[in-house]
Amino acid sequence: MNVTLIGMSGAGKSYIGQKLAESLGLEFLDVDRMLLEPAHKKPLQDILDELGDEKFMQWEERMMIDATTDKDGLLISTPGSVAYEKDALEHFKNISSVVYLRVPFSVIEKRVGTTPRGIVGLGKKTLRELYDERHLLYQKHAHFEADAHERDVSGVIETIKGFLHSRK
Protein backbone atom coordinates (compact mmCIF):
# COMPACT_ATOMS: atom_id res chain seq x y z
CA MET A 1 0.00 0.00 0.00
CA ASN A 2 1.16 3.50 -0.88
CA VAL A 3 -0.36 6.80 0.23
CA THR A 4 0.30 10.13 -1.51
CA LEU A 5 -0.40 13.47 0.16
CA ILE A 6 -1.13 16.47 -2.04
CA GLY A 7 -1.86 20.08 -1.12
CA MET A 8 -0.41 23.57 -0.98
CA SER A 9 2.93 24.44 0.56
CA GLY A 10 2.16 24.99 4.22
CA ALA A 11 -0.71 22.47 4.33
CA GLY A 12 1.22 20.16 6.66
CA LYS A 13 2.11 17.40 4.18
CA SER A 14 5.56 16.86 5.66
CA TYR A 15 4.54 16.98 9.32
CA ILE A 16 1.30 15.03 9.02
CA GLY A 17 2.90 12.70 6.49
CA GLN A 18 5.70 11.75 8.83
CA LYS A 19 3.26 11.04 11.68
CA LEU A 20 0.88 9.13 9.39
CA ALA A 21 3.74 7.05 7.96
CA GLU A 22 4.80 6.07 11.49
CA SER A 23 1.22 5.17 12.38
CA LEU A 24 0.78 3.02 9.26
CA GLY A 25 4.25 1.47 9.28
CA LEU A 26 5.13 3.03 5.91
CA GLU A 27 8.41 4.50 4.70
CA PHE A 28 8.14 8.30 4.57
CA LEU A 29 9.28 10.01 1.37
CA ASP A 30 9.31 13.82 1.50
CA VAL A 31 9.92 14.67 -2.16
CA ASP A 32 11.21 18.19 -1.49
CA ARG A 33 13.61 17.32 1.31
CA MET A 34 14.63 13.78 0.37
CA LEU A 35 14.72 13.87 -3.46
CA LEU A 36 14.81 17.34 -4.96
CA GLU A 37 17.09 19.30 -2.63
CA PRO A 38 19.67 16.49 -2.25
CA ALA A 39 19.81 15.96 -6.04
CA HIS A 40 20.88 19.57 -6.59
CA LYS A 41 22.46 20.14 -3.16
CA LYS A 42 20.54 23.43 -2.96
CA PRO A 43 17.35 24.78 -1.39
CA LEU A 44 14.25 24.54 -3.58
CA GLN A 45 14.08 28.28 -4.22
CA ASP A 46 17.63 28.25 -5.64
CA ILE A 47 16.80 25.28 -7.88
CA LEU A 48 13.63 26.97 -9.09
CA ASP A 49 15.48 30.23 -9.78
CA GLU A 50 18.12 28.33 -11.75
CA LEU A 51 15.80 26.15 -13.85
CA GLY A 52 12.64 28.25 -14.18
CA ASP A 53 9.13 26.91 -13.61
CA GLU A 54 8.76 24.70 -16.70
CA LYS A 55 12.12 22.93 -16.54
CA PHE A 56 11.80 22.61 -12.77
CA MET A 57 8.41 20.89 -13.05
CA GLN A 58 9.61 18.54 -15.80
CA TRP A 59 12.59 17.54 -13.66
CA GLU A 60 10.47 17.30 -10.49
CA GLU A 61 7.87 15.12 -12.21
CA ARG A 62 10.49 12.71 -13.59
CA MET A 63 12.23 12.46 -10.20
CA MET A 64 8.95 11.63 -8.42
CA ILE A 65 7.85 9.02 -10.94
CA ASP A 66 11.27 7.35 -11.05
CA ALA A 67 11.55 7.26 -7.25
CA THR A 68 8.14 5.67 -6.71
CA THR A 69 7.70 3.28 -9.65
CA ASP A 70 7.49 -0.37 -8.55
CA LYS A 71 7.64 0.63 -4.88
CA ASP A 72 5.26 -0.40 -2.13
CA GLY A 73 4.93 0.71 1.46
CA LEU A 74 5.49 4.43 0.84
CA LEU A 75 3.89 7.54 2.28
CA ILE A 76 4.74 10.21 -0.31
CA SER A 77 4.64 13.89 0.58
CA THR A 78 4.53 15.72 -2.76
CA PRO A 79 5.45 19.30 -3.63
CA GLY A 80 2.51 21.69 -4.06
CA SER A 81 3.31 22.03 -7.76
CA VAL A 82 2.32 18.40 -8.37
CA ALA A 83 -1.10 19.92 -9.14
CA TYR A 84 0.28 20.92 -12.57
CA GLU A 85 2.05 17.63 -13.32
CA LYS A 86 -0.54 15.41 -15.02
CA ASP A 87 1.72 12.41 -15.55
CA ALA A 88 2.78 12.42 -11.91
CA LEU A 89 -0.81 12.76 -10.71
CA GLU A 90 -1.94 9.86 -12.89
CA HIS A 91 1.03 7.83 -11.67
CA PHE A 92 0.16 8.51 -8.02
CA LYS A 93 -3.53 7.73 -8.61
CA ASN A 94 -2.47 4.36 -10.06
CA ILE A 95 0.03 3.37 -7.38
CA SER A 96 -1.52 4.87 -4.25
CA SER A 97 -4.41 6.39 -2.38
CA VAL A 98 -4.17 10.14 -3.04
CA VAL A 99 -5.21 12.34 -0.12
CA TYR A 100 -5.66 16.10 -0.44
CA LEU A 101 -4.79 17.92 2.78
CA ARG A 102 -7.21 20.81 2.59
CA VAL A 103 -6.35 23.96 4.56
CA PRO A 104 -8.02 27.39 4.25
CA PHE A 105 -6.13 30.08 2.36
CA SER A 106 -5.79 32.27 5.46
CA VAL A 107 -3.81 29.50 7.17
CA ILE A 108 -1.61 28.86 4.12
CA GLU A 109 -0.91 32.58 3.88
CA LYS A 110 0.22 32.71 7.53
CA ARG A 111 2.34 29.57 7.25
CA VAL A 112 4.02 30.46 3.96
CA GLY A 113 4.35 34.17 4.72
CA THR A 114 6.61 36.29 2.55
CA THR A 115 9.59 33.95 2.70
CA PRO A 116 10.33 32.35 -0.68
CA ARG A 117 10.06 28.57 -0.42
CA GLY A 118 10.28 27.32 -3.94
CA ILE A 119 6.65 27.79 -4.91
CA VAL A 120 6.19 27.28 -8.64
CA GLY A 121 4.29 30.14 -10.26
CA LEU A 122 4.61 32.60 -7.39
CA GLY A 123 6.47 35.13 -9.51
CA LYS A 124 3.67 35.23 -12.08
CA LYS A 125 0.62 34.88 -9.83
CA THR A 126 -0.30 35.80 -6.29
CA LEU A 127 -0.39 33.16 -3.58
CA ARG A 128 -4.19 33.53 -3.56
CA GLU A 129 -4.42 32.90 -7.31
CA LEU A 130 -2.21 29.82 -6.99
CA TYR A 131 -4.28 28.55 -4.07
CA ASP A 132 -7.58 28.94 -5.94
CA GLU A 133 -6.19 27.32 -9.09
CA ARG A 134 -4.50 24.43 -7.31
CA HIS A 135 -7.40 23.75 -4.95
CA LEU A 136 -9.56 22.70 -7.92
CA LEU A 137 -6.78 20.51 -9.32
CA TYR A 138 -6.13 18.83 -5.97
CA GLN A 139 -9.85 18.10 -5.62
CA LYS A 140 -10.02 16.69 -9.13
CA HIS A 141 -7.17 14.23 -8.58
CA ALA A 142 -7.62 13.19 -4.94
CA HIS A 143 -9.31 9.99 -3.88
CA PHE A 144 -10.09 11.67 -0.56
CA GLU A 145 -10.01 15.14 1.00
CA ALA A 146 -8.97 15.57 4.62
CA ASP A 147 -9.58 18.80 6.48
CA ALA A 148 -6.10 19.38 7.88
CA HIS A 149 -6.94 22.52 9.83
CA GLU A 150 -10.03 22.03 11.99
CA ARG A 151 -8.75 18.94 13.81
CA ASP A 152 -5.55 18.26 15.67
CA VAL A 153 -2.95 16.11 13.91
CA SER A 154 -4.13 12.89 15.56
CA GLY A 155 -7.68 13.62 14.36
CA VAL A 156 -6.47 14.20 10.81
CA ILE A 157 -4.49 10.96 10.93
CA GLU A 158 -7.48 8.98 12.22
CA THR A 159 -9.70 10.45 9.48
CA ILE A 160 -7.20 9.43 6.79
CA LYS A 161 -6.76 5.98 8.32
CA GLY A 162 -10.55 5.53 8.28
CA PHE A 163 -10.61 6.36 4.58
CA LEU A 164 -7.71 3.98 3.85
CA HIS A 165 -9.42 1.20 5.79
CA SER A 166 -12.59 1.70 3.73
CA ARG A 167 -10.60 1.25 0.48
CA LYS A 168 -9.35 -2.22 1.38
Image (spheres, grey):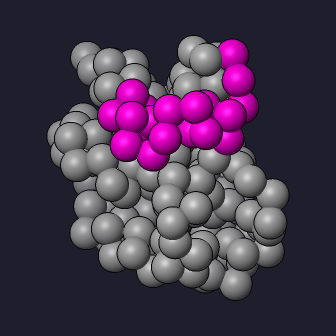
User: Which residue is found at the position 50% from the left and 33% from the top?
Assistant: 51
Q: Is residue 137 visible?
A: yes
Q: Residue 59 in magenta? A: yes
Say which of 129 and 152 sits in front.
129
Where are the magenta residues, as a range?
41-60
Q: Residue 135 in magenta? A: no
Say which of 166 and 73 sits in front.
73
Say which of 45 and 148 sits in front.
45
Question: In the rendering, at what x and y percent does residue 147 appear?
Answer: 55, 75
Q: Quadrant of residue 67?
A: top left
Q: Is residue 44 visible?
A: no
Say which of 43 and 49 sits in front.
49
Question: In the rendering, at what x and y percent does residue 19 appear?
Answer: 68, 44
Circle count: 0
In this rendering, the answer to whether 68 lies above or below 123 is: above
User: Which residue is found at the position 21% from the left and 41% from the top?
Assistant: 87
Q: Quadrant of residue 122?
A: bottom right
User: Which residue is found at the position 70% from the left and 84% from the top?
Assistant: 106
Q: Quadrant of residue 25?
A: top right
- Dividing the image into 4 quarters, which one contains the N terminus? top left
How would you classify the magenta stretch by its main secondary structure? helix
In this rendering, the answer to whether 57 lies above or below 126 is: above
Question: In the rendering, at what x and y percent does residue 57 appear?
Answer: 39, 40
Is 62 positioned to the left or the right of 80 in the image?
left
Question: In the rendering, at what x and y percent does residue 131 appear?
Answer: 51, 74
User: Which residue is found at the position 31% from the left and 61% from the top?
Assistant: 142
In this rendering, the answer to whether 94 lies above or below 65 is: below
